[in-house]
Amino acid sequence: MIKVIITGPESTGKSTLSKNLSNYHGEPFVPEYARFFLPTLKEPYTAFHLLEIARGQIFWQKLYESNNKKMLICDTGVETIDIWFQYRFGSIDPQIRELFIAEEDCFYLLCKPDIPWVEDPLRETPHQRPQIFDSFISLLNQFEKKYYVVEGQHEEDRLRCALDHLKKILP
C-alpha cells in the first residue's frame, strides 16, 4: 500500500485535496486528528497536547490502513505537528521528531500557500505561510523524505497537479 500525506501550512487546501483524492481513487482518507482533538480542550493547548495530537494522528493512520486497498491518503501527518511545535514553542520536541522520522515508505504532497487565506478558529498564522512552507521544505529535505509540491489557484488545478505527481509513484 502507498501512503500519501497531504501536508503544508495552514489554509493551503489540504483537507479539500484529501477529499478530492479520496473521491478520485475511491479510498477513504485519514482526517486531521487535531480538528477533532483541539475543540475538546477547555484551556489553550500546550506542548503536551501537540504530542498527543501527533500520537492520535498516527493511531488514526493505523486504523484506516486496514480499510484501504491500494493507497492511504492522510490529511496531514506528524511533520505538521513537528513544524507547528517549533513555531508555537520555539523548539523541537524530540518525541514528535522521532515519530516523524519513523514515518517511512510514504510520499508527501506539500501544498503551496498560493491560494487565499480562509479564516478558521483553529488557524493562527495568516501572514507566515510562506515562511512555514519553507520550513516544510527544509524538514522534508533534511530527512530525505520524498515530496512533491502541489500548486494552483483553483481546486481543480491542485487536484490535477497532485494526480500528475501521484502518477510518478503509483504502480
Image (cartoon, grey):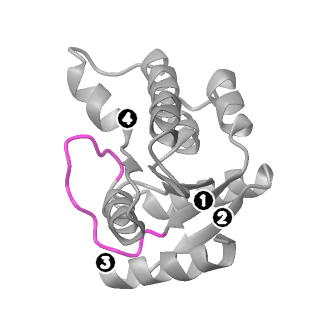
Name the secondary structure under disc 3: helix
Residue 146 position, x and y percent, is 72, 61
Residue 128 position, x and y percent, is 43, 56
Binning the other alpha carbons within 10 Å of mark 3 as few (below 14), some (14 to 19) or many (20 upward) gives some
Residue 55 position, x and y percent, is 52, 24
Q: Is residue 125 visible?
A: yes
Per the model, the C-alpha gap separating discs 4 and 2 is 21 Å
Q: Which mark is residue 6?
A: none
Q: Is residue 114 above or below residue 147?
A: below
Of the two numbered discs 3 and 1 on the same chain, state the one appearing first in sequence.
Answer: 1
Per the model, the C-alpha gap separating discs 1 and 2 is 4 Å
Residue at label 1?
A: 108
Binning the other alpha carbons within 10 Å of mark 4 as few (below 14), some (14 to 19) or many (20 upward) gives many
Per the model, the C-alpha gap separating discs 2 and 3 is 20 Å
Residue at label 4?
A: 33
Q: Is residue 35 above or below residue 52?
A: below
